[in-house]
Image (cartoon, rainbow, N blue to C red):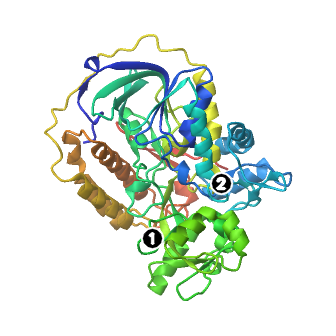
Amino acid sequence: MIPRYLVDFDLRALPMIKTDVIVIGSGIAGLFTAIKASEDRHVVIITKKSILESNTRYAQGGIAAVISDDDSPEAHLEDTLFAGAGLCSLASVNVLVHEGPQGVQELMRMGTAFDLENGELALTKEGAHSHRRILHANGDATGFEIVRALSEHVLHNENIEVWDNHFVIDLITSEGGCVGALVQLPDGQRVFVQSDATILCAGGAGQLYRYTTNPEVATGDGIAMAYRAGALIRDLEFIQFHPTSLCYPGAPRFLISEAVRGEGALLRNVKGERFMERYHEQKELAPRDIVARAIVSEMERTKSTFVYLDITHESEELIKHRFPTIYETCLQYGLDMTTDWIPVAPAAHYMMGGVKTDFNGETNIARLFACGEVSSTGVHGANRLASNSLSEAIVFGSRIVNHIRELPPLEHVDIDITYDLHRLGPPRQPIIERRLKLQKVMVRKVGLRRNKDTLTEAIDELNRQLPIFQAELKKREEYEFANMLICSVIMAKSALKRQESRGAHYRDDFPHRDDASWRKHILMHCDQGMLEETSDDV
């Protein structure tokens, strides 16, 4: 019931704009890749809101790369593989840990100002890292600093056009390759943008859940449009819930960075007791999926809706210097983290799975690439190691651009493409109601802890929403809901299929990891259905 395209159209009747490269999205993946591509290509960046609005902007912790002499790529690789729980691609992680430092240097050349200590790059440590290798900026505003620097570079670049407030409805394919995108302009008109290469940098899908650290734009658009176009979607059952988002009346689910625990913060239940030692030997620095489930277990045991994060034993100077954004945000709601314990609870945060790519970021569809959270490069496996995501974006962004330079230009594109399902008119039920219902289903039945019964119920409830694809969709919120529904169905079906617990995927009815049966990936394809692929981790 999921159609090839979300809307009916006749490509011959639409205005056509040609460019060398389309970049869909404006986080670190989109901005960095666009800058690299613009060195010898004309690039159009298409973003559905503004160039500054993305998951990257809200990234606090930092970017992981081997910088210090007492660290090594081998140690970074080992930490990444351990967190990934047997599903990382060893070859992809090798690429990340060896090419990441060079990518950081490029970010600095593009104007990113990372924090310094005594004239040297300041490094911190986060959960499951064996060394201090996390670079940060303005304390806890790393993502914002990166977006600031890259967006300034983009806006002064003659080879880059930025289309704010435009929505990419679908990818256009012809003869097995991607030839561009169907785009809706701010006034509702549509155009066909033809390109030699299309790069998905559309971010994640945190908005599938009612409680998330992601901004409103994170609705899984890139994954859904790639799925409709025939791309392979891999590992979507692995959604990371950040253990510590602010949980306080009147406040948003603001992320309290993992770096706070890295700098010594303790987790306490509502009785004031430390509890992580009962769940893992690394205590507060355990992998985040373990910390998140431990918090939920402790909330259930104490019949509470939150636990506390306590960093009051550290100096006021350290807290204000290292975490100025978190400090100021908490202060707005009457919480002083230098003296108060901060109430926190898990929230949907990061998606390990996505559009499957090779080492050059190319999908199974020729000329279609994916970079950043929307992609599945094999780096993260079943659970992302903290702060590897920003590194992944710049490393594979560079590789994508290098590969695009080897592609011959499209000499002829057959635009004799029409699509008409005779759709029946606008959706009957308000989209805001549909969206809230979907989010409730996902948080209650496809959340941190899952089982066969809840997942089956979720799939049944989501399937009842599928008639939306027979309606005539015209608005951004309608496209977003359709994309969210596709991602939710794939995620729930993948979670039901994986009958084990591994990384960020936890099944109450299969609480143990099963390498003999499940050391493999689950993929979804629009025509072939569910597929399996052996993991190459060792």
Residue at 62% in and 41% down: 149
- Along the viewing direction, whichever of 361 and 195 lies nearer the viewer: 195
Q: Which residue is mark 1?
A: 508
In percent of width and height, residue 80 lies at 67, 53
Residue at 36% in and 65% down: 445
In percent of width and height, residue 226 lies at 41, 37
In the rendered structure, are the residues bearing label 2 and label 1 in contact, judged by CB atoms less than 8 Å apart? no
**Is there any visible trace of residue 361 in the rendered image?**
no
Residue 403 is left or right of residue 192, and the answer is right
Provide the secondary structure element on which disc 1 rests: loop
Residue closest to the far bottom? 271
- For disc 2, the neighbor class at 10 Å (few under 14, some 14 to 19, many from 20) is many
First along the sequence among labels 2 and 1: 2
Residue closest to the far left? 424
Residue closest to the far top? 411
Residue at 73% in and 52% down: 76
Q: Quadrant of residue 165?
A: top left
In percent of width and height, residue 4 lies at 30, 34
Provide the secondary structure element on which disc 2 rests: loop
In percent of width and height, residue 361 lies at 56, 34
Residue at 47% in and 67% down: 510
Residue 109 is left or right of residue 204, and the answer is right
Q: Amino acid at mark 2?
A: Gly
Q: Nearer the viewer, mark 2 or mark 1?
A: 2
Q: CA distance from mark 2 to mark 1?
A: 33 Å
Q: Which residue is mark 2?
A: 62
- For disc 1, the neighbor class at 10 Å (few under 14, some 14 to 19, many from 20) is few
- Along the viewing direction, whichever of 139 and 93 lies nearer the viewer: 139
As displayed, is residue 291 above or below residue 11? Answer: below
Q: Amino acid at mark 1?
A: Asp
The quadrant of the rendering that contains the N terminus is: top left
